[in-house]
Image: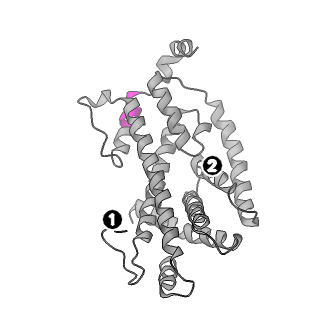
Amino acid sequence: MNTYNMVKQRFIKKWINTLHMLDSSIEHPLNVTERKNAIRLSSDLAIAAARSGSTVWSRALISRSGNKTTNKPMARRILKKARNRMKNRCRTLRRNGNFTAKVGVRKRTEFLKSLVPGGELIDDKDYLIRETLDYIVYLRAQVDVMRTVAAVDLVTGNVTNDRRNK
Amino acid sequence: MSNRRSRQSSSASRISDDQMIDLVSKLRQFLPEIHERRRSDKVSASKVLQETCNYIRKLHREVDNLSDRLSQLLDSVDEDSPEAVVIRSLLM
């Protein structure tokens, strides 16, 4: 099976889990904004969880998103694991030292670091590039899956082909 | 200060051409907008980084918009309505 499809599958599975997790921890009924935030949060947590492994971005995303959830034992457990691994990872990364570059590249690199979760902790340029590429794959999967779900025709259950509807 | 640093370590620390070529070839799958310079070994690091940042920001915006749309879609759905059944069956 195509790797990208596998990524999307993992994301879908995790998203169902995170939706349930959040659903049990927030107070209903929700207004539209609260629901949007819950959807966004569950989706972000899901791509991070789908990325099983040792990427900085996935743990930073869990850590960052955790601040937005209410206290729940499961969320706290995920956070604790993520934060501990992050601390160890940061120590390793900082030892690799800084890199300098011409002003244009430096500025844009700083900006890239601000876009990739945990990027600000990465000093090694090779590492940053690898993390960025990895993160982009999962971001794309997130968008593709959410777009498909949003395109479901609620009456027939079919996915509308023209995604520009609505 | 940054001048001093770059003079000392410039040979070791600039993003090398090989790395840039590697990054560009990987990004090209995602970024059709990266216009290949006439000589590929002269692809501007700055340009590649810029395109990457633009792309990530675009994806972030899309996730945000889609979260909006999904929450509005769900807002119009009653708990026990047939639409809710469809959504539930989709997610299961």
Find out whether residue B17 is within the magenta segment. Answer: yes
- Residue A65 inside the magenta-drawn segment: no
Q: Residue at x 61, y 67 (%)?
A: A18
Quarter of the image where one finds residue B52: top left
Question: Which residue lies at the image location 63% right of the left edge and 49% below the top edge?
Answer: A60
Looking at the rendered structure, the kind of residue marked 1 is: Arg
Residue A122 image position (x, y, % from top left): 59, 37
Point out residue B58 in the picture as x, y percentages from the top left corner.
43, 49
| Mark 1 neighbour class, 10 Å CA radius: few under 14, some 14 to 19, many 20 or more | few
Q: Chain of mark 1?
A: A
Q: Is A96 above or below relative to A148?
A: above
Q: Residue at x 66, y 70 (%)?
A: A21
The CA distance from mark 1 to mark 2 is 33 Å
According to the picture, the residue beneath numbered tag 1 turns out to be: A164
> In terms of secondary structure, what is the magenta stretch mainly?
helix
Q: Is residue B56 left or right of residue A65?
A: left
Q: Which residues are magenta?
A: B16-23
SS at mark 1? loop
- Establish whether labels 1 and 2 are both on one chain: yes
**Closer to the camera: disc 1 or disc 2?**
1
| Amino acid bearing label 2 | Ala
Q: Is residue B51 left or right of residue B84?
A: left
Q: Which residue is mark 2?
A: A60
